[in-house]
Image (spheres, helix red, strand yellow):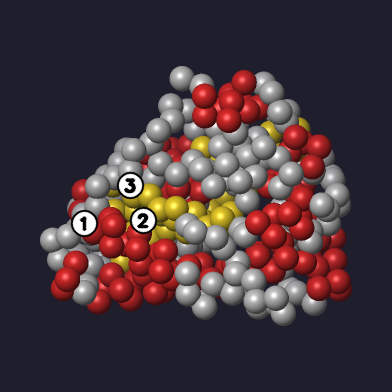
């Protein structure tokens, strides 16, 4: 690890993430030997970025800032938020997974279900690997969504929420903006999973190349598209936005039962609104062209 001291720490972290996703750990566990994810993208945000306090004000007092996350593992460290970096990554599903789910009209495909179940496992392994590598180099780190300090909550303004959001962290790190269905639209699309760490390391923050938190959504920024509305079989997405409760009941009910019976997989998943839409694998062209 000493080879990286004084070098570009951001490039080092990015390479660690890319190498892990290029390893056999990135496996869907099916007979075809499919990977779960394609090449990731990575971004960084300062621990003292005011946006995290904005999230707390908007979502609720239970929402944790990077400093609160870090102090959950090291309460007496005396660390300041300016010493922390939020490391965020986006892991896009492979093309075959997206294609399979795009063909479905009511219930998820097997590859999509595997992408959820095994994707979570890959993401957790990646977090643990990164923490080990960072701490081996002398940088303390933690995963904000570790069950030891993460919990689901109810927000007065947003309904179902949690103490940390991987998508909000990715937004803060310049990796994407939100769509009508609440998915994060990134340069590799919204058919993806994301993850993050908070580390006591200095990395230059990634620029946020957008002015609005909905800039990449064709419907929210320009009134066009809305195809994710048509993709939802239970009407959980409308022109007014995403009904989290209706979506949750669908995923945890009929979808979970179907996936268990049809594919022998234990996971709650749907994802139809993330496929067969213009933002599935990219930022829509018209959104990119806007000033």
Task: Mark 3 vs mark 1: give the one in front.
Answer: 1
Query: Can you identify the residue that label 2 sits on?
Result: 87
Residue 142 seen in the current view = no
Task: Indicate which disc, 2 or 3, sits on the residue closer to the N terminus.
Answer: 3
Residue drawn where x is 47% and y is 62% of the image: 145
Q: Residues within 10 Å of mark 2 (few under 14, many from 20)?
A: many
* Among the two numbered marks 3 and 1 on one chain, the one whose residue lies closer to the N terminus: 1
Q: Does the CB distance between marks 2 and 3 fall below 8 Å?
A: no
Give the residue pinned by disc 1.
8
Residue shown at 70% from the left, 76% from the top: 32
Q: Is residue 42 left or right of residue 96?
A: left
Separation (CA) of disc 2 from disc 3: 7 Å
- The nearer-to-camera label among 2 and 1 is 1
Mark earlier in primary sequence (2, 1): 1
From the viewer's side, name the closer residue of 126 and 53. 126
Instruction: Pick whichever, 142 or 223, lies toward us.
Output: 223
The residue labelled by disc 3 is 45
Question: Within 10 angstroms of label 3, few (less than 14), some, or many (20 or more) residues?
Answer: many
Helix, strand or loop under label 1: loop
Task: Give the percent coordinates (x, y) of residue 199.
Answer: 29, 61
The residue shown at (67%, 21%) is 223
How far across and how far down the image is residue 51, in percent? 37, 38
């Amino acid at each position: 690890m000493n080879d990286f001291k004084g070098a570009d720490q951001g490039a080092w972290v990015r390479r660690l993430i890319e190498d892990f996703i290029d390893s056999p750990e990135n496996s869907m566990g099916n007979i075809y030997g499919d990977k779960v994810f394609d090449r990731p993208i990575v971004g960084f945000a300062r621990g003292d970025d005011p946006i995290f306090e904005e999230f707390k004000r908007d979502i609720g007092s239970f929402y944790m800032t990077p400093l609160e996350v870090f102090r959950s593992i090291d309460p007496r460290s005396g660390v300041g938020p300016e010493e922390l970096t939020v490391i965020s990554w986006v892991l896009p599903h492979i093309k075959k997974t997206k294609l399979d789910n795009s063909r479905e009209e009511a219930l998820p495909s097997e590859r999509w279900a595997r992408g959820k179940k095994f994707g979570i496992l890959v993401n957790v392994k990646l977090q643990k690997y990164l923490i080990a590598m960072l701490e081996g180099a002398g940088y303390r780190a933690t995963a904000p969504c570790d069950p030891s300090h993460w919990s689901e909550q109810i927000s007065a303004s947003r309904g179902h929420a949690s103490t940390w959001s991987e998508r909000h962290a990715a937004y803060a790190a310049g990796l994407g903006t939100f769509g009508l269905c609440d998915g994060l639209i990134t340069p590799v699309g919204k058919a993806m999973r994301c993850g993050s760490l908070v580390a006591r390391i200095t990395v230059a923050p990634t620029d946020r190349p957008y002015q609005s938190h909905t800039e990449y959504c064709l419907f929210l920024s320009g009134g066009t598209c809305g195809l994710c509305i048509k993709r939802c079989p239970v009407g959980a997405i409308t022109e007014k936005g995403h009904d989290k409760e209706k979506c949750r009941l669908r995923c945890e009910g009929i979808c979970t039962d179907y996936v268990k019976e049809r594919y022998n997989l234990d996971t709650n998943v749907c994802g139809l609104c993330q496929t067969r839409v213009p933002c599935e694998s990219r930022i829509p062209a018209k959104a990119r062209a806007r000033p």
